[in-house]
Structure formats: C-alpha cells, structure tokens
Image: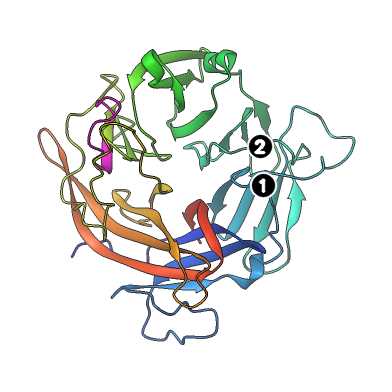
C-alpha cells in the first residue's frame, strides 16, 4: 500500500432515488469511529466506510443530471438544476446555485442567476479558485460572489451537441461533446483564457469520459474512460484511466497501468455484440483526494442491480484510491485502498460526485 500522511479528502456521492436524491460520503475509517443508523451496512473495504448524509435530505430536485457539484472545504455547491430564477429580477446571463455548509445551517441560494439552467456537463474548481461549470451555457464564477462570467459558446453548440467538462488548467478549459466529430466521434475543444477563443483539438476520439484531473505542470490530463479513446465504434471496451498529452494534443497509447479490470477496481472489459452494438453503461468519476500528495487520486463507478429483499432498484458504488507514478513512457498506479457498498433500496444512479471536506 502507498499514500501520503494525513487523512484524504472525503468523497461525496449524490444518487437519484425514488423519493428524492440520496447523499453519501466515503471516508477513511478511524479507531474512534462509532457506527450509527447512517453507516451503510454491507460496505466491503478494509480502510473506508460509507455514511448517509442526513443534512442534505432537502435535495428533492426531480431532474436527472441537471446540476453540477463541487465541494470547497466543507461547503457543497450544487449549480444550476431545476427551479425558479433567483432572485426574480436577476440577470439572465448568470447561473444560480445552492450551497450547503456541512458545519451547520440549511441550503442557501446564491449566484443571483437561473437555477433552471441545466448544468449537466460537470463542474470543477480551477487553479484560480473559481468554479467552472458546463451545461447549456458555460460559466466561471467566484464562490465568494465577487466574480461571474459566461464564456463564449463553443462551436459544437452550432450543431446542437452537448458539452461536458474534461479539465481546467491555468490557461485552458477543456471540454468534449459526445458525437459531433468525424463519423459520430467525440469532439474535444479547448477555450484559451487569453485569446478568448475555442480551438477544436480533435474530432476523431470515441467513448464516454469523466471530468478529469490535470497534473505534472499542466502537461497531462487524466480521465476515467469507458474505452480506449483511439479505438473505433464496436471495438472491445477496455475501461481505464487514459492520459491526454496536452502539449502534443494526443492520447497516450496506454492507460495507467496497475488498475485491474476485475469488477472490483475497474469495470470488466466489455465485448459488444458484433451485430447490434449496445454499449455498457455506468457513471464514472475521477478526482484528486490527497491533501498533501497531488498525485493521490480516486476513481468511482456504479453498478445497477436489484435490492435482495424488495426487488427494487439498488445502486452499488465501487471505488479505488491510488497514487500515480510516472516512468519514462507511461504511468502506473500504486494501490491505496478500494471498496464497494450497496446503497439504499430504490436508488437508481450516481449523478454527481466530488471530493472535499
């Protein structure tokens, strides 16, 4: 096992359920931990535990995937979503958000913009401390309310494609669209903060990619991909953490090594039907969790099944924590911990996930 000293950031997972949205936190076990009614039973991990967060029970948003999520310190920011504009006289070009301090108090409205501005494409905190959020419109704003900006729409919007966040550096915001490229491939774009222009970086990669992590002096972007981005439609789907070389503007030929596709760390390799291509589906997330080591990451994905007692829907979340190591021509992972946990009855899908607290 490997890791830095000190506790990791906790992982907060937002899951859509039958009667509202459920929130859970994955955190390191402690010698003084005392299980209570909110500790999930059935959690299989030697190092982590899963608790239900009661303080976010007011989250009853009915629209699946309409909000983006980030955590700064102990405050949750739920951006966009479904609801009325707040306040009524606010500027249409601003995006609204709700925030919750886990230290106390309830949800508070902020941003002075539209809550009904779907931010399905993910959000991240940039190196400048601003929040970047992607959806029907793309914004960056200060969590302190001192700055707010709507970015120029990417060229892909001309074709009706929906952008999704990939990563943020000090110079560039990276997004991609599912389809929109050559023969239905993904289109990858970068917004240069200095020139204020979008550049099409590629239009020939495939697969579904998580919001990623940018490391090594803004040189490499790491994303949890359902398949090798360089392979064509109908090829074998090999899930993994794939690496985009920002300087050379290309994906590396191999994913991060040391993360097995065994259904316990990464999903199994998927071999599609050669006649009717039906892709495998699961929500995938990747984030930094090390408070001291920036190369300490975690991946998370979900499994959809039936509850053993009620036969209702039930989500199981699977996670793995690891430290990235760089060699001459590739990256490898050293395991820190892993685990899985079945969630409550009538849970359907993990819709947001972030590290913080």
In the image, is residue 233 part of the stretch drawn in magenta?
yes
Q: Secondary structure at mark 2?
A: loop
Q: Comparing marks 2 and 1, which lies closer to the viewer?
A: 1
Above or below 5: residue 135: above
* Residue in the image at 50% along x and 14% along y: 198
Q: Nearer the viewer, residue 107 or 159?
A: 159
Which secondary structure dominates the residues rendered in magenta? Answer: loop
* Callout 2 touching callout 1 (CB < 8 Å): yes
Q: Quadrant of residue 23?
A: bottom right
Q: Quadrant of residue 306?
A: bottom left
Above or below 94: residue 17: below
* Residue in the image at 20% along x and 42% along y: 256
Q: Nearer the viewer, residue 69 or 346?
A: 346
Residue corresponding to mark 1: 63
> What is the quadrant of the N terminus in the image?
bottom left
Q: Nearer the viewer, residue 193 or 257?
A: 257
Left or right: where does residue 102 sit relative to residue 98? left
- Choose the circle earlier in sequence order: 2 or 1: 1
Residue 326 horizontal/vertical position (percent): 16, 41
Q: Is residue 174 visible?
A: no
Residue 14 horizontal/vertical position (percent): 55, 57
Q: Secondary structure at mark 1?
A: loop
Residue corresponding to mark 2: 118
Q: Which residues are magenta?
A: 229-242
Above or below 291: residue 251: above
* Residue in the image at 29% along x and 64% along y: 338
Residue 39 horizontal/vertical position (percent): 49, 79
Q: Residue furthest left?
A: 328
């Amino acid at each position: 096992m490997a890791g830095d000293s000190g506790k990791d950031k906790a992982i907060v997972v937002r899951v859509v359920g039958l009667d509202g949205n459920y929130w859970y936190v994955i955190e390191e076990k402690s010698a003084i931990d005392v299980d209570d009614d909110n500790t999930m039973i059935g959690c299989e991990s030697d190092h982590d535990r899963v608790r239900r967060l009661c303080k976010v029970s007011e989250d009853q948003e009915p629209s699946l995937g309409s909000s983006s999520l980030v955590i700064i310190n102990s405050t949750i920011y739920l951006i966009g979503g479904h609801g009325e504009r707040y306040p009524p006289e606010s500027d249409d070009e601003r995006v609204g958000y709700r925030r919750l301090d886990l230290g106390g108090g309830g949800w508070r409205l902020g941003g002075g913009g539209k809550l009904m501005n779907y931010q399905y494409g993910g959000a991240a905190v940039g190196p400048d401390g601003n929040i970047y959020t992607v959806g029907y419109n793309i914004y960056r704003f200060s969590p302190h309310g001192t700055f707010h900006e709507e970015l120029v729409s990417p060229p892909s919007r001309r074709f009706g494609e929906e952008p999704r966040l990939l990563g943020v550096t000090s110079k560039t915001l990276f997004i991609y669209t599912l389809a929109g490229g050559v023969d239905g491939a993904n289109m990858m774009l970068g917004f240069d903060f200095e020139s204020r222009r979008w550049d099409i970086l590629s239009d020939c990669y495939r697969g579904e990619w998580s919001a990623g992590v940018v490391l090594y002096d803004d040189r490499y972007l790491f994303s949890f991909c359902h398949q090798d981005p360089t392979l064509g439609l109908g090829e074998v789907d090999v899930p993994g953490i794939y690496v985009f070389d920002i300087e050379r503007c290309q994906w590396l030929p191999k994913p991060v090594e040391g993360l097995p596709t065994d259904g316990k760390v990464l999903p199994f390799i998927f071999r599609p039907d050669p006649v009717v291509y039906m892709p495998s589906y699961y929500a995938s997330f990747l984030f930094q969790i090390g408070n001291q080591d920036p190369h300490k990451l975690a991946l998370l994905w979900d499994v959809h099944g039936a509850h053993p007692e009620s036969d209702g829907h039930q989500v199981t979340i699977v996670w793995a924590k690891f430290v990235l190591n760089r060699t001459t021509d590739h990256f490898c992972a050293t395991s820190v911990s892993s685990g899985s946990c079945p969630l409550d009855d009538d849970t359907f899908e993990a819709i947001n996930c972030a590290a913080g607290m």
